[in-house]
Amino acid sequence: MAPRPPWRAVLAGTAVAALGLTALSPVSAFAADTDYESEAATISQGAVESNHAGYSGTGFVNFDNVVGSYVEYSVNAAQAGTHTLTFRYANGTADNRPVKLTVDGGDKGTVDFPATGAWTTWKTVTATVQLTAGVNKVRTTATTANGGPNADKLTDTFTAPVDPEPPTPPTNLKASNILPTAATFTWTAATDNVGVVRYEINRGGNILKTVDGNTTTATVDNLTPNTAYDISVGAFDAAGNPSQQSNVVTFTTPPSDDTTPPSVPGNLRSTGVTANSVSLAWNASTDNGGTVAGYDVYQGATKVATTTSLSTTVTDLSPNTSYTFTVKARDPDGNTSAASNAVTVKTSASGGAGGIPEYDRDIAKVDLGWAVDFLPNGNALVTERDRFEILLVTPSGQKTTLGKVPGAVGTNGEGGLLGLAISPNWASDHAIYLYHTASGDNRIVKMTYDGTTLSSTSTPVLTGIAKNRYHNGGRLKFGPDGKLYATVGDAKNSDNAQNKSSLNGKILRLNPDGSAPSDNPFNATGGNARYVWSYGHRNPQGLAWDSRGQLWAAEFGESSQDELNLIQKGGNYGWPSCEGTQGSCSGFVAPKKTWPTSQAGPSGVEIVNDWIYIAGVTGEQLFATQINSAGTGVGTVSTLFSGRWGRLRSVTKTPDGGLWLTSTNNDKNGGTPSVLDNVIVRLKFPGGAPSGFKLTSSAFADNATIPDKYTCAGDGTAGQDPSPPLAWGASEGAKGYAIVFADVANDGNKLHWAIWDVPATTRSLPEGLGAGYTVPNQGGAKQKAMGSGANAQKFFGPCPGGSSHPYTFTLYALNTATVPGLTSSSTMAQIETAIKGASTANVKLRGKSSASAG
């Protein structure tokens, strides 16, 4: 390697001299950029402000006008070497405002910050310094009485030769000397074009032990007695390239000679009651072996929950009824404590169900049902991970195998056929999008399904996503903006997460044709960075949007904390420096909720009525929590159905107002598809849709012809039609109602008209509603129709042009008086999405029409 140049600072727009680098074989240039917002740094004699436009992040730092004021950044360098520091700033004065630059106290010279012409004009200056691997304290200190500039952010760029070739997988992994808390592993060494520097011994994607590249045998001594393990080994080279995993060895550690049970759980108490549920919490037990394997919750003599958490919510109870509960703790050897104190709780008489669902019925048995999405007609498509098949499942449980996804392969672990998203324009394009592992990568592809036949070929949408046995991510979902979002794991290379040039360790945002949206945060950077919506993720999972249009996502942690995140455009979520709230987390977006990794394993995510539901794989339970009124966080988390169905993989809201929950209990080791021992169940919301909740019209019967006077045939012109009279029964607890009218020919959903914010006391709408975004004489209700101008301000009746089409009026019960986020400029699709998001139940009135204009 050629000598490094001396430190120097240059002004924005001036080229930085290239480093002289001797190539490794093979080699490519690689630049990793990491941003550090000034407002998140350590500040002395300065203030965070936001009164000048154009800053990034949440503000900027205004130095006090004194010598010695400073901003200190904690720069976490993945690799030691020469780094370029780029300072973004504004200086609206006529004077230069120089600062002294130090790294870990070492003087690196002076950086000039000349005038930028205005405080709203932001420019950059750069400095080249040597950083060590890990956290470096980079301080900029004012050297004159004028203080420093307005400091927006610091960007660290490390440019170095990169070896892109990963090691070969280690082979012939074997386990021996298996004891209650230890086992010895041996393997045949991996090979690499440069050299293997370390091996990681993994269980389920989590590292048990790391050894150097010259070691091919190791004893892991932190195992748990009487516990099943699946172990593999991965190799890494100096550039951080991970191999694919070795073969997998499975075994169960023998029990120990421990016969002492854990201590009795203390202070069992009720933390919440509804008409159908009781929430419980208790104090942790201790065990002489150091490990409490879990807790069993009893309702009288019946075990109703099994959990590793210190709380659970027991559902499916009867109103106005008393129940008595106790809890017992157990250790890995099966020793069980005595019962806790008993607590007797009476459910409420009625109502108050909130967001706590209860079991409704089994839908179907499937093999590794990984993702679910619903077609407009209410049927669902389901992906089976290891069979690589797409299933059609009806609400009644009828199941049809549509076909296999071509080119999909497994990884003997977490890869295979994963995410599924049905096009929001499915009625016209019949497109479905899939995330799957292929021979050389993970990829997003498009297939077609016309309601009868699945295409036999797929079209690549985005390829080149690195794969591994672990950390593949794989969720797909269309957002309210019509863009396709994808979660992508780091593929066991944590450096990927902070490298915007890598697609891994990210949440990606794509146009449906696979191009990058122009408003993505790093679109101007080019390359893979164009697709990045957020980064710094280890293995992100479920995606869902709340009523404000905010994106929430779950994430698997390494060994300390799992996460629920509120996703910011361009946000950095900290991996690998920060896991949850553990590690070096300054300057990164903090999670809204964390769990110990032994209790959660958050996978699929759904939001209904601003309640978030998270399917827990590791914890084998469903989490439910309500977004707060400000939309900035969540409240108390309830743990539901603990241990009832095992590992829960996905949760998806249904068109009829419930949830489908999938379990995947034979997925821990991957490999050959197993028996159909995994189930899709339907959950319901008590009190959501009483038998009297029904939509009718005095003008026509259900599934009858809609009279011409309410169609374009009435006046010979499409749009501006009189609306039919409508009436309905109450839905318990509803705070408002909405109705959406659509043409559903060919299983489509052509939205004609919607009315929402109908007051909770209203039970009918008269014939011929007046025109206007605010509906005249209807208590503040709003309406919008297809078309533009006057056509968008009044009911738009059927006009299929002479051929008979089916139509539906869908009545929604809402738990909000005002559907948030909607304006007169909202599209029909946005309006329907927001109404569904605020809905607790819905019913339909069907009609037919063959009307034509003129």
Image (cartoon, rainbow, N blue to C red):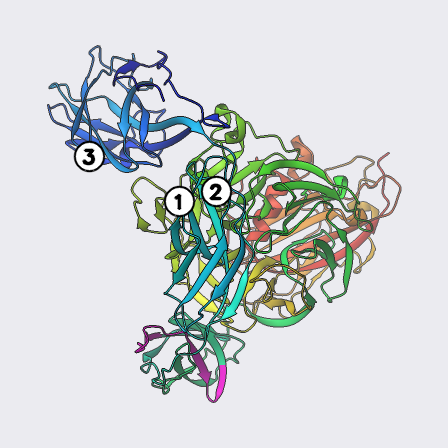
Rounded to the nearest angstrom, the CA distance separating label 2 from label 1 is 8 Å
Q: Residue 811 appears in which quarter of the rendering? A: bottom right
Residue 549's tag is none
| Three-letter amino acid code of the residue under disc 1 | Trp
- As helix, strand or loop, the secondary structure at mark 1 comes to loop
What residue is shown with label 1? 575
For marks 1 and 3, the one nearer the N-term is 3
- Secondary structure at numbered mark 2: loop
Secondary element at tag 3: strand
- Please state the extent of the stretch shown in magenta in the rendering: 282-303
Can residue 775 be seen?
no
Q: Which mark is residue 43?
A: 3
What residue is shown at x 50% (from left), y 35% (from top)?
193
Residue 794 relative to residue 29: left or right: right
Q: Relative to the observer, which residue lies in front, 728 or 499?
A: 499
Residue 124 vs residue 611, the one in the foreground: 124
